[in-house]
């Protein structure tokens, strides 16, 4: 699989810095290579930009508030009535995207609306809006204050660091509902009797579908995270590179993931959006752009993957998903799903998505223009992502009951 | 024949008159009511489709106005806020009339055709990004 480098990272960066880099989006590159031929194209193209925009529940942020007078050692805290984890240092909090607001009836009156939660707080923070902090403490000799309450914005924080332990899922399930009643899932509202289906991937634009063997995307890769310059800090949680793959090595299911981080103070709110999933909960949708340096022809060839060549498994979220039966109804290509209708068991089923291809396209273009103008240099990974990793189920039985 | 989508708003007094009935009887108009509501502030709203000859439509609207009913033809009972929409397409399977639809399958961008909207409010419930809202 390894191939001699045609270009080094240093050479590509020199071309970027000189304003001479040739950059294409993962959508544009397919036609370009088809027209020019792989060998001609590899000497011309320096970078291919990939992107995705979709809900990523595994998101959150670390916030440092600075000290009050007298000092407090926060032991419980809420931002806009959304609980933040205070079991860190005195004035540090962790706010998770899926935390629901205090007083939200959740699914008590099913299906719940989940209008506001962690993801929305994060969106408002990035937008520079005012939020309300309430922090409590049991008080100590060195941190005597028992309560802090007041308004703040991101400008008042010393640090606001986004962390996504799991983002950029290489591929993903397609959800369908075989039952007799409507179900409410993290992939949206699914009508009974397979009357619609929902997918969640940018397909041919998606970062890890363009680098299926993690040849250029690794730990230390510089990325565009909602407008800020960030990086891949580890393999993502549930990274499962040993997934089933097609003849080209493209995973046919979940597979690899990335752990990402960036400075929230530099983010743009339109790419950091709170999500309300009816009957399910709150989340956060994030825009991510990942550059792929064209270091050799095989790396380039893999970026030419098209929606019609990428398939995803259709799974019944009313039974097989919750019960973990492993049954796959069929596999569909992203091309077919993006057409608006797809064939499942002989029926034409309406399709929709929860991730946004339109936003992913926008981001791939923005990253492309940042690289072309010399503002975004690439970084060589310091470590590779594991290629042979399996995701294991929880084995703490005996008694996990509803 | 012409079809017009109207948003009527009125004070409580007008709500007590059979205005819709009059539209049918006096002006020979076909009516399809999408939704109607009287708010706790006692203001009434109604969204309806009116079909008939152009002259009759005009006279019908003049009649409504003479009854102190505000008539709005800009179809804004349900709003789609394009700047909040992420074009995720999560709503498209739930919109019964395709008022919300993917208008460009290459770019996967959404459009909203407010004249096709029957104000079922399904999109408001399913949109994860709060891009759809109701005026009342
Ligand atoms: S209110 Fe109903 S008809 Fe109108 S856009 Fe929303 S889903 Fe479509
Ligand atoms: S569900 Fe909301 S955000 Fe998504 S396409 Fe429809 S209106 Fe836009």
Image (cartoon, coloured by chain):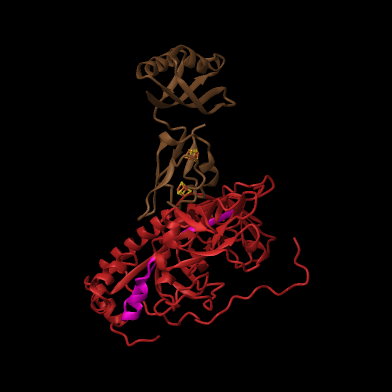
Look at the image and tell me in which quarter the N terminus of chain A lies: bottom left
In x, y percent, where is residue A219?
Answer: 45, 78
Look at the image and tell me in which quarter the C terminus of chain A lies: bottom right
Give the answer, above or below, for where A53 lies relative to A20.
above
For the view shown, which residue lies furthest in the front direction?
A: A346
Q: Is residue A121 visible?
A: no
Instruction: Say if the magenta span includes residue A299.
Output: yes
In x, y percent, where is residue B67?
Answer: 47, 13
Q: In the image, A113: left or right of A250?
A: right
Residue at image coords 49%, 68%? A171
Q: In which quarter of the image is residue A36?
A: bottom left
Give the answer, above or below, for where A122 lies relative to A103.
below
Q: Can residue A198 be seen in this view?
A: yes
Q: What stretch is highlighted in magenta?
A: A281-306
Q: Nearer the viewer, residue A201 or A257?
A: A201
Colour red, chain: A
Count of residue discs: 0
For the view shown, which residue lies furthest in the right direction?
A: A399
Q: Colour of chain B?
A: brown
In x, y percent, where is residue A401?
Answer: 76, 63
Q: In the image, A393: left or right of B19?
A: right
In x, y percent, where is residue B24?
Answer: 48, 16
Q: In the image, B128: left or right of B57?
A: right
Instruction: Say if the magenta span includes residue A142.
Output: no
Residue at image coords 32%, 73%? A377
Q: Which of A58 and A41 is in front in this view?
A: A41
């Amino acid at each position: 699989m390894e191939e001699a480098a045609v270009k080094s990272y240093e050479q590509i960066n020199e071309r970027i810095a000189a304003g001479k880099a040739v950059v294409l989006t993962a959508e544009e590159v397919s036609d370009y290579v088809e027209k020019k031929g792989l060998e001609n194209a590899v000497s011309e193209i320096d970078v291919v930009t990939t992107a995705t925009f979709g809900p990523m529940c595994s998101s959150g942020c670390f916030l440092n508030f600075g000290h009050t007078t007298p000092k407090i050692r926060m032991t419980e805290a809420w931002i806009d009535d959304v609980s933040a984890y205070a079991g860190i240092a005195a004035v540090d909090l962790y706010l998770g995207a899926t935390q629901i607001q205090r007083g939200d009836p959740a699914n008590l009156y099913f299906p719940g609306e989940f209008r506001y939660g962690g993801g929305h707080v994060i969106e408002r923070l990035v937008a520079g809006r005012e939020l309300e902090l309430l922090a409590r403490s049991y008080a100590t000799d060195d941190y005597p204050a028992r309560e802090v309450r007041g308004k703040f914005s991101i400008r008042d924080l010393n640090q606001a660091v986004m962390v996504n332990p799991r983002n950029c899922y290489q591929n993903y399930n397609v959800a369908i509902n075989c039952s007799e009643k409507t179900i409410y899932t993290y992939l949206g509202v699914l009508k009974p009797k397979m009357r619609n289906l929902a997918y969640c991937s940018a397909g041919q634009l998606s970062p890890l579908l363009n680098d299926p063997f993690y040849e250029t995307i690794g730990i230390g890769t510089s990325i565009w995270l909602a407008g800020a310059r960030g990086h891949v800090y580890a393999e993502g949680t549930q990274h499962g590179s040993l997934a089933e793959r097609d003849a080209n090595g493209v995973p046919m299911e979940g597979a690899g993931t990335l752990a990402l981080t960036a400075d929230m103070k530099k983010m743009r709110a339109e790419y950091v959006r709170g999500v309300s999933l009816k009957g399910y909960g709150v989340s956060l949708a994030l825009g991510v752009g990942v550059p792929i340096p064209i270091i050799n022809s095989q790396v380039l060839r893999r970026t030419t993957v098209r929606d019609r060549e990428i398939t995803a498994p259709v799974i019944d979220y009313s039974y097989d998903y919750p019960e973990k039966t492993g049954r796959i109804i069929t596999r569909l290509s992203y091309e077919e799903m993006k057409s608006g209708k797809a064939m499942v068991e002989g029926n034409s089923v309406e399709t929709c998505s929860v991730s946004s291809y339109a936003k992913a396209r926008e981001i791939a273009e923005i990253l492309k223009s940042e690289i072309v103008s010399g503002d975004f240099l690439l970084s060589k990974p310091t470590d590779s992502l594991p290629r042979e990793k399996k995701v294991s189920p929880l084995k703490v039985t005996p008694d996990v009951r509803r | 024949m012409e079809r017009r989508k109207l948003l009527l708003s009125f004070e409580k007094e007008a709500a007590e008159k059979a205005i819709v009935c009059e539209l049918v009887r006096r002006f020979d108009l076909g009516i399809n009511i999408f939704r109607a509501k009287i708010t706790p502030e006692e203001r009434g709203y109604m969204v309806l489709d009116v079909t008939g000859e152009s002259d009759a439509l005009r006279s019908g609207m003049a009649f409504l106005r003479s009854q102190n009913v505000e008539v709005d033809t800009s179809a804004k009972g349900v709003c789609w806020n394009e700047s909040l929409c992420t074009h995720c397409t999560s709503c498209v399977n739930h919109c019964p009339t395709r008022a919300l639809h993917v208008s460009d399958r290459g770019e996967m961008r959404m459009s909203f055709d407010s004249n096709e909207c029957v104000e079922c409010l399904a999109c408001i419930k399913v949109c994860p990004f709060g891009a759809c809202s109701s005026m009342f």
